[in-house]
Amino acid sequence: NAGVTQTPKFQVLKTGQSMTLQCAQDMNHEYMSWYRQDPGMGLRLIHYSVGAGITDQGEVPNGYNVSRSTTEDFPLRLLSAAPSQTSVYFCASSPPTGPPTPLHFGNGTRLTVT
Amino acid sequence: GDSVTQMEGPVTLSEEAFLTINCTYTATGYPSLFWYVQYPGEGLQLLLKATKADDKGSNKGFEATYRKETTSFHLEKGSVQVSDSAVYFCALGDQGAQKLVFGQGTRLTINP
């Protein structure tokens, strides 16, 4: 049972480059989300999705795009990377509805933008 | 908006010491409260949760009680082990929503 799988684990980009962080889950969870983790700031929500075809912005969406064409996949796109996007990125998923249910997290992608 | 404040870290203790990590929150509704743990190189894992006032969440010897009157959800453990060394995050989630708001995290190191 793979859970939430993120690729790549590490990535170095130059300023202005673009890339896509991949996230896939095999638990048939409808809710998926992306967080970034920065020292002293905890995790901040970038974008989330409550189901295929539906996405919405979180707390820090600028510079990032998402799409949700299938239940399983929720990629995060950086169109033009900036040093301020150096961070550790976590994808998470959970079942839908009712009181907030625990999120299942991937192991993260460590991104460095030079 | 909703927010979570955790005690400043890092925290260093000796094995078998008593642990408290403070967490207070601000929320407009009646949120569910969570503690997550992050071991080195891994993602976050749910440690325990409480969904209403006076509920006590517990797991692996850790406990936290949802105190509405003091808007707190402090994490405690009576006797810590070296294997408890990790970063601990307090979080809240509003009813009917899956978005979580996290505290800044507290790094805990246990020395043998």
Image: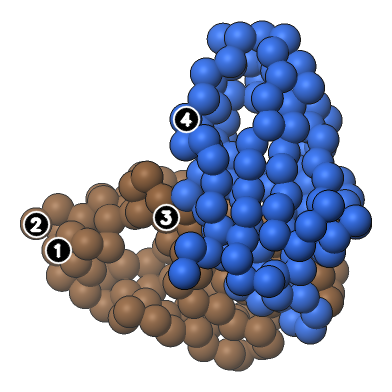
Q: Colour of chain B?
A: brown
Q: Residue at position x 47%, y 49% from top?
A: A107
**Mark nearer the viewer, 3 or 1:** 3
- Say which residue label 2 marks: B112
Helix, strand or loop for disc 4: strand
- Say which residue label 3 marks: B38
Task: Estimate the x, y position of residue A46 in percent, counting from the top left.
Answer: 75, 43
Do the residues indicated by labels 3 and 4 lie within the same chain of the protein?
A: no
Q: Residue at position x 82%, y 51% from top?
A: A68
Callouts 2 and 1 close, C-beta under 8 Å: yes
Is residue B75 depicted above or below B51 in this figure?
A: above
The alpha-carbon separation of the residues under discs 4 and 1 comes to 34 Å
Do the residues indicated by labels 4 and 1 lie within the same chain of the protein?
A: no
Residue type (three-letter) at the residue carrying disc 1: Glu
Front residue (pair A56, B18): A56
Indicate which disc residue B15 carries: 1
Do the residues indicated by labels 4 and 2 lie within the same chain of the protein?
A: no
Indicate which disc residue A10 carries: 4
Label 4 Cα crowd, 10 Å radius (few <14 / some 14-19 / many 20+)? few
